[in-house]
Amino acid sequence: MELNTDFSRRVLVRTDALPWTPSPTAGVDRRMLDRIGGEVARATSIVRYAPGSRFPAHTHDGGEEFVVLDGVFQDEHGDYPTGTYVRNPPTSRHRPGSAVGCTIFVKLWQFDPADRTAVTIRMDDQRLLVDPDRPGVSVVPLFADGRETVQMEQWAPGSRIALDAPGGAELLVLDGSCEESGDVLKVHSWLRVPVGGEINAVAGDSGTRVWIKTGGLRHIAHPNR
C-alpha cells in the first residue's frame, strides 16, 4: 500500500475526518496518514484500541514512536497514560494493548537502524522551556540526535511561528488550533512539510500545543528493502 508517499509535497490531514480501518487484530482500528508497505510498513497512523484489546507480541525491527492521545496504553513494561511520548527502538519487543481503551499517534519504521535509545516521557510533567529565539514559544525536548529533533511545543495565543525545515518537518496538533499557510488546523490535524520547506503558523485564540519533529524526512526507507 502507498499513501501520501510523495515526500516532496506538503500534506495536511484532518485526522478526525478519516474513517477507521480495522487492523488484523480485533478491537484495534487505524486512521492511516502515510504508508509505504503492507502490514509491515513505514507508516504514520492514528491507532485506536478498544477496551480489553491487545496485539500479539512482536518485535519492532524498524522502531516505533508514539504519543498517547487519550486513555491508557499498556504493555508488559508499564502503563502509559494520556500525554506520554514513547520511543521503542529497533529490536525492541512488546505485547501492546489497553484495558480501558486508548488512542495513539504512532510512527513505524522511521528510526536509524543503529538507534537503541528507549525513551518514555510524560510530557505534562515536564517543565516548559522558553525558546529565546522564537517569541511566544515554549518547548519540552523529547529526543534529539544527528538525524532528527522531536519536541512538544506550546504556542502562546496569537503568536506567529516561522520555522525553516531544511530536513523536513511534521507536526500533530495536541490542543487548541492554529492557522498554517491559510489552512486551519484543529486538534489531531497532522501536517507534513517537505525537505527545504517551512512552517508559517499563527496560534489560535486559546494557544496551540503541538508535537513536532524536524529533520527526519531526509531519510525515507522502505521496510522491505
Image (spheres, rainbow, N blue to C red):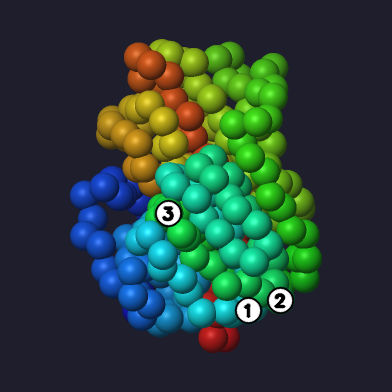
Which residue corresponds to the image point at 61% horizontal and 22% vertical from the top-left? 138
Q: In the image, residue 96 lies at what x, y percent?
A: 54, 67
Crowd rating for badge 2 (residues with CA inside 10 Å; few <14, some 14–19, many 20+)? some
- Is 70 placed left or right of 169 in the picture? left
Residue at image mark 3 = 100
Q: Give the residue drawn at x 49%, y 65%.
A: 97
- What is the total number of numbered labels drawn onto the structure image? 3
- Residue 21, visible in the rendered structure: yes
**Mark drawn on residue 209:** none
Decide: few, some or many residues near mark 1? Use Cα within 10 Å; few <14, some 14-19, many ≥20. some
How far across and down, in percent of the image, does residue 51 sit? 38, 60
Identify the disc placed on residue 91: 2
- Kindly indicate whether the residue at mark 1 contacts the one at mark 2 (C-beta within 8 angstroms): yes
The foreground one among 216 and 59 is 59
Disc 2 is placed on an element classified as loop
Q: Amino acid at mark 1?
A: Thr
Q: Nearer the viewer, residue 86 or 210?
A: 86
Of 10 and 23, nearer the camera is 23
Q: Is residue 170 visible?
A: no
Judge left or right: residue 43 versus residue 168: left
Quick one: SS at disc 1?
strand
Mark 1 and mark 3: Cα distance apart in space: 24 Å
